[in-house]
Image (spheres, rainbow, N blue to C red):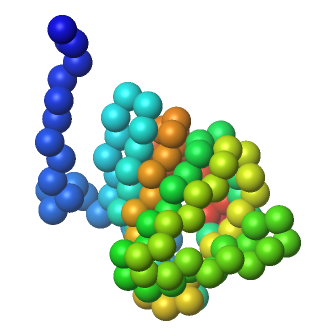
Amino acid sequence: MSTQTVRLHRWDEIALEKVTEMLSRKLVTGEREMIAQIYLKRGCLVPMHSHESEQMTYILQGALRFLIGGEEITVREGEVLHIPSWVEHQAEALEDTFELDVFSPIRQDWLDHTDEYFHR
């Protein structure tokens, strides 16, 4: 029998964190995974960066153009992009975009606000 606690999270009860003028997010973390609702305004640029976490980006509304290894990949509503650990990438919102990111392991830099690449 597991001693771990099951927990229900409600997005509407989670505070929206304003990361920049162009990007806001809500976070839910487990022991080894994190899911984030991300809101990007058209023209928002997430600068080139990499991280230990494997990432899945699911576009619920809008479109993002990623630059990965010199290749441009446009991800649109209903599509999912998988980014392996330590792969450098940047993203640009082609329109107002609402998306979900799933990370494993957890993005500790997001929790302790050391994600400086957003502010370059």
Residue 108: image x %, image y %?
Answer: 52, 38
Q: Residue at x 49, y 46 (%)?
A: 103
Residue at far right of view: 70
Q: Quadrant of residue 85?
A: top right
Q: Quadrant of residue 26?
A: bottom left
Residue 88 left/right relative to 63: right
Q: Residue at x 51, y 40 (%)?
A: 104
Q: Residue at x 41, y 44 (%)?
A: 34
Residue 75 left/right relative to 66: left
Residue 106 left/right relative to 14: right
Residue 112: image x %, image y %?
Answer: 49, 41
Residue 28: image x %, image y %?
Answer: 32, 46
Quarter of the image that includes the N terminus: top left
Of residue 30 and residue 77, the one placed in the foreground of this image is 77
Residue 12, above or below 6: below
Quarter of the image that includes the C terminus: bottom right
Of residue 61 and residue 107, the one placed in the foreground of this image is 61
